[in-house]
Image (tube, rainbow, N blue to C red):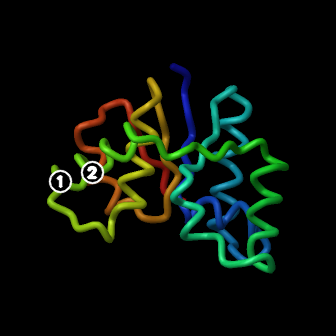
Amino acid sequence: MAEALVLDSEALNAIANWSERGALASRSRAILALAMQRGSRVRVPAPVLAEVCRGPKFDAAINHALKARGIVVEDLTEAIARRAGAILSRGKLASAHAIDAFVVATAAEYSTAVIATGDISDFATLITPYKHIRLFGI
């Protein structure tokens, strides 16, 4: 399967609300531009939307970013959900980290993947068994 850039909620929020996010927005937009230039698939796991969608007033910027940038919302499948559960179990983490585990489980679907995140420390633990996943701190 192809290379992917998987965005966590912080990265998606920074892309969508760039005027409010300063350096985070610049870094997020830079990795997004590079991914698109390379022909990488840019994905947001569906559960990430639960962290960033808060009603029409706030969702407009998210919806625009997804559509305008060609970012695809990746469905939560049974296989991804089960993999996320295994990731949490392996890391001895509570369900409070479920969204991050969904991000990693989605990235694991691709032959090579980069996760753009504002939370490197949490993700570093979660990706340990996946040598084909790298992190990009925004």
Instruction: Compare residues 61 and 17 and report the one nearer the observer.
Output: 61
Residue ID at (81%, 49%): 67
Q: Nearer the viewer, residue 6 or 20?
A: 6
Residue farthest toward the front in the current orientation of the protein: 78
Q: Are marks 2 and 1 in contact (CB under 8 Å)?
A: yes
Which residue type does callout 2 highlight?
Gly
* Residue in the image at 56% along x and 53% along y: 46
Count of labels shown?
2
Query: Would residue 132 appear left or right of 95 to someone viewing this image?
Result: right
Q: Residue at x 80, y 80 (%)?
A: 57
Q: Residues within 10 Å of mark 1 (few under 14, many from 20)?
A: few
Quarter the C terminus occupies: bottom right
Q: Which residue is mark 2?
A: 85
**Residue at left 66%, top 66%?**
14
Please, what secondary structure does the residue beneath circle 2 have? helix
- In the image, residue 80 lies at what x, y percent? 40, 41
- Residue under label 1, please give it: 89
Which amino acid is tagged 1? Answer: Ser
Q: Is residue 102 left or right of residue 10?
A: left
For label 2, the crowd category at 10 Å Cα-Cα, with few meaning under 14, some 14 to 19 and many 20 or more, is some
